[in-house]
Amino acid sequence: MIGECPQIQKLKSTIERVANTDIAILILGENGTGKEVVAQLIHYLSDRRDQVLVAVNCAAITETLLESELFGHEKGAFTDAHQAREGKFELADGGTLFLDEIGDMSLGGQAKLLRVLEEKTIVRVGGSTPIATNARVLAATNQKLAELVTEKKFREDLFFRLNVLTIELPPLRDRGDDVVLLAEFFLKGFCKKARRDQIVISASAKKKLKGHNWPGNIRELRNLMERLAYMFQGEKVEAEDLEFIISPRRADASAFDMNLTLADASKSFQRQYIQQHIERAGGNMTDAASRLGLHRSNLYRKMRQLDMDGTEEDLDES
Ligand SMILES: Nc1ncnc2c1ncn2[C@@H]1O[C@H](COP(=O)(O)OP(=O)(O)OP(=O)(O)O)[C@@H](O)[C@H]1O
Ligand SMILES: [Mg+2]
């Protein structure tokens, strides 16, 4: 894990200390701060490293499906259950189960999960035989879980069960010189991949990188370095070269140009709105699309209609 700022140093030593235990760890942090990277690190530093690391995105599946995904199902448990299937808890037996986006799990799902964690056995959907599970559970979310507990959207007992230890990843904007360290690391890798000479980051550009707000955190930085490696034509990046890529926060986004027709004003609004969502998603178009309530391909279509740049499909994924 790259990083030398004090928070990260402390975090690394915590991870080394707890990796090879079975205690439940809750990994918190904004979008793109490296929660999944931490989960992998914990797994590979533990004696479970030769077993599987199974990840489940709890936000991506509906409550009913999640149950069979996690606990498996017996043949005939529901209409489409033509065959019995192991759930992720069984697959992760002896290894690590990473429950990602746990803050998005429904209350019903939470109740079932809690029971499994307490009893260390699962029962497949439509089954009755308890099956022992020895999976080490790691959970992550970018939501403020403690607040969800206060709002009664997340069960307090499950929160305490998962939160034996919390690892909180700092936002990139608070990591000082790590921004430059990570930028150079990613740029080096992408230049090599793009089969071109290394690009140097000038002092002014470093300053600009350190001053940026990084709403998409490390993912945003990584995507930016990838774009530079493929699109930047010089040998040394200056602050101005980043202008086009890092758009400055608008001082007053509510100042309208009163000379526009309603159609043009709404186009202009849509452009800005989409652009900000893409930035918040750290350049991840799938993510940005879902925040906008669109399918990814529809987002691209919309952007083309609005004459927006950056519709190259191959440069946006992390
Ligand atoms: N310390 C690190 N060193 C190198 N790359 C990193 C590091 N931390 C994160 N990354 C990279 O940044 C990107 C985002 O990391 P990751 O997916 O772990 O974040 P996340 O917190 O799980 O994000 P999300 O909230 O969107 O799920 C990935 O491409 C990952 O490889
Ligand atoms: Mg993640």
Image (tube, rainbow, N blue to C red):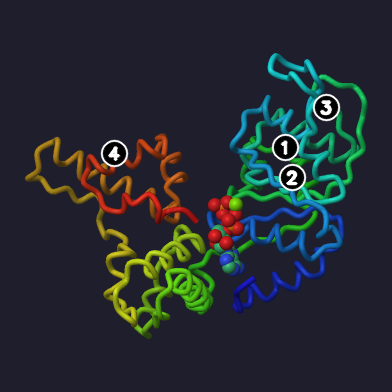
Q: Give the numbered dot on residue 190.
A: none
Question: Whole-Å distance between the Cαs marked 3 and 1?
Answer: 23 Å
**Which sits in the foreground, 279 or 232?**
232
Disc 3 or 4, which lies upstream in sequence? 3
Q: What element carries label 1?
A: loop
Residue closer to the observer: 4 or 7: 4
The residue located at (85%, 45%) in the rendering is 93
- Identify residue for label 2: 159
Residue 187, image x and y in percent?
Answer: 46, 73
Between marks 4 and 2, how big is the CA–CA gap? 40 Å
Mark in front: 3 vs 1: 3
Identify the residue position indicated by label 3 in the image: 124
Image disc number at residue 302: 4
Locate residue 246 relative to residue 216 in the image: left or right. Answer: left
Nearest to N terminus: mark 4 or mark 2: 2
Q: Which of marks 4 and 2 is in front?
A: 4
As drawn, is 191 to the left or to the right of 69?
Answer: left
- Report which quarter residue 6 is drawn in: bottom right
What kind of element bears circle 4? helix
Where is mark 1, residue-wise? 155
Of all residues, the one furthest to the bottom in this rendering is: 203
Nearer-the-camera pick, 115 or 309: 309
Contact between labelled residues 1 and 3, with CB atoms less than 8 Å apart: no
Label 1–label 2 contact, CB within 8 A = yes
Q: Residue at x 84, y 41 (%)?
A: 117
